[in-house]
Amino acid sequence: MPPPIALTALQHHEREDGQGYPLGLSGKDIHLHAEIVAIADVLQAMSSNRVYHQAMPFYKVIEQMNRDMFSKFNPEILMELESRFMSTLVGKEVMLTNGRFGTIIMIDPYNPLKALLKTGTEIIDLRMEKEWQIERIIG
């Protein structure tokens, strides 16, 4: 097995602040691939139903990961992955926290969760609708 793959498997539960496991590594001591996989692993775990918890709404997952940006995750990688992930959602239907449905038509590069949506004939700018969030990605 190539060393980067083995290091990724070993280190993907390590955290930027050294509070991870199994070795308690921090910052630059963690392999780049492990930092990427750590973010993907947490994103998938939080947004999926598990025997020990229900899937969290999409916006809550992203909010929690952003709160952990400077302790658990490499901020540069998290911001880049979040931006790239959100850009793949342009054209996708989402459900909002108010129960309405819309299609993402544009992502704000400085605040990717606050997208511009089209709902029938109406345009909703989530930057202006502070109480509404993307609850779930429909497809």
Image: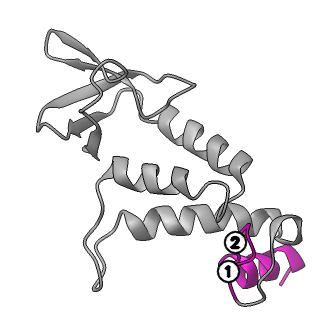
Tell which of 33 and 67 is nearer to you: 67
Q: CA distance from mark 2 to mark 1?
A: 5 Å
Q: Give left or right: position of 3 versus 61.
A: right
| Residue 83, position as x, y percentages in the image | 57, 36
Residue 15, placed above or below residue 106: below
Note whether 135 is above or below 74 in the view shown. above
Q: What's under tag 2, amino acid-wise? A: Arg
Q: For residue 20, which numbered disc appears in the image?
A: 1
Residue 116 located left or right of residue 78: left
Upstream in sequence: badge 2 or badge 1: 2
Q: Nearer the viewer, residue 133 or 33?
A: 133
Among the 4 quarters of the image, the one containing residue 124: top left
Amino acid of disc 1: Gly
Residue 127 coordinates in the image, percent (x, y): 37, 21
Magenta stretch?
1-21
Residue visible at 30% across and 28% down in the picture:
130
The reply to whether residue 81 is in sight is yes
Residue at figure coordinates x 24%, y 44% from the top left: 138
Question: Where 91 falls versus 125 (above or below)?
Answer: below
Q: Visible in this render: residue 139? A: no
Mark 2 in CB contact with mark 1 (< 8 angstroms): yes
Give me the disc on residue 15.
Answer: 2
- Badge 1 marks a residue whose secondary structure is loop
Question: Of helix, strand and loop, which one carries label 2?
Answer: loop
Residue 13 included in the magenta stretch of the image: yes
